Amino acid sequence: MKKMVKGLSLVLVCSLVAGITVPVSAAKKMKLSSKKITLKVGQKKKLEVKNTAKKVKWSIKSGKKYISLSGKKKTSVVVKAKKQGKAVVLAKIGNKKLTCQVTIKKADTKKPTVPTTAPTATVTPAVPTLTPAGTLTPAPSASPMETPAATPEVTETPEPEEPLEPGEFRYEGLDRAWIEKNIDPAKPVVAMTFDDGPGSNGSTFVDYGLRIQQALKDVGAHATFFYIGGNIVKSEECRQEVQQALDWGFEIANHSYDYASLDKASAEEIKEKLDKTDAILKEMSGYSSFLFRAPNVAYGDTMFEVIDAPIIDVSNWSHDYKPDSEVDKDKIVANVKAARDGDIINMHSTYEKTAEAVPEILAYFQEKGIQVVSVSELFAIRGKKLMKGEKYFRVD
């Protein structure tokens, strides 16, 4: 009986112990010190990943021209605002990714206060006097002049952009400082444009667009890339091509969401496709509006009623979209060499023969003193405005 009671007691004690729940504090979730930050140009902000001892890999996911990263440590980094715009910082911890959206605003432009300089006393040179005894009395030494306060350096405030007229378009990525530094308005200028990117051939990524961008960068030229929204979202490689175009100062623009012509499409379909591509470009650049070129350069009356952007047509055709049997690399070069001052050149960033032709074309333009820029830069250089809903072939 005693053994039975003792056994029952042990069972009871074990049951009670098993029933006791020891609270365990849940592991704290990794997070960024800030998910969104706003800086003015020149300002800095420290970002940190909390609740981790692992090393964080920091990078700029988008907007490399607007911010820089410095002071990288195991779990923190310093973000510096370089230029007005938007950017995204990426923190990678193993397979975990965290992002912080950065908005950069213009720096305050206060007029410097120049202190009034105290008037400088005029010192009359002392003349020695002759005493009755005929000896010269030395003149009293002049008091040393006070050094006037140094005038502070005055930093010129850049002239603000003129306000837009009703219906006027202005590309927010337009860099007038680049134009002033690199472009001679007295020389011929052409706009080079590339359609149908980013580089995607079915499900396979092709690097022709990247090669074209590199050729442009090598000679300090710019261009406009009319991107198809559906191509951008195909792969991370496609997104990176668009991001590189932004980072290198090229203009990005809307070429609808797919290749289908819109000349006979309904107003609803046109608006839907343009809005979808605009949303992707806005998310990547932080800009609010973009130039538009219709797929297959096919236009209908409905498009002009719906499209709230300048419509960019063509005055010089490379014809690179034609079969190789009709137009090869050499023919592309010959076609584009015919471009004249103010022309808008049409090419495609999805053909290898085009990627091969571009360096040769750029070398020819350099030899002839013809400057290569984007569409928005071309109009700015010539002092022409781009109006929404209007179609443009060239600048006269």
Image (spheres, rainbow, N blue to C red):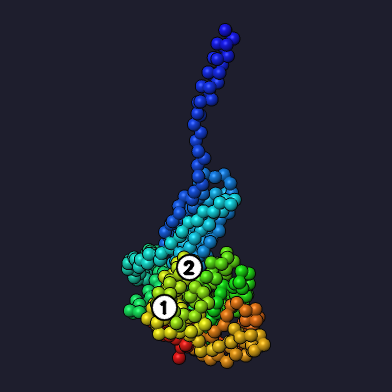
Quarter containing the C terminus:
bottom left
Residue to which mark 1 is pinned: 266
- Binning the other alpha carbons within 10 Å of mark 1 as few (below 14), some (14 to 19) or many (20 upward) gives few
Whichever of callouts 1 and 2 sits on the residue coming sooner in the sequence is 1
Q: Residue placed at 51% from the left, 25% from the top?
A: 19
> Relative to residue 330, is residue 251 drawn left or right?
left
Rendered image: mark on residue 280:
2
Is label 2 in a helix, a strand or a loop?
helix
Q: Position of residue 9 (x, y in %)?
A: 54, 14
Is label 1 in a helix, a strand or a loop?
loop
Q: Position of residue 10 (x, y in %)?
A: 56, 16
What's the residue type where badge 2 is placed?
A: Ile
- Residue depth check, mark 1 versus mark 2: number of the one nearer the observer: 1
Q: Position of residue 206 (x, y in %)?
A: 63, 72
- Binning the other alpha carbons within 10 Å of mark 2 as few (below 14), some (14 to 19) or many (20 upward) gives some
Front residue of 186/156: it is: 186
> Relative to residue 213, is residue 377 drawn left or right?
left
Task: Answer yes or no: is residue 392 visible.
Answer: yes
What's the residue type where badge 1 is placed?
A: Ser
Q: Gap between marks 1 and 2, in whole Å?
A: 22 Å
Q: Residue placed at 46% from the left, 59% from the top?
A: 101
Q: Looking at the image, do the residues carrying marks 1 and 2 touch, with CB atoms under 8 Å apart?
A: no
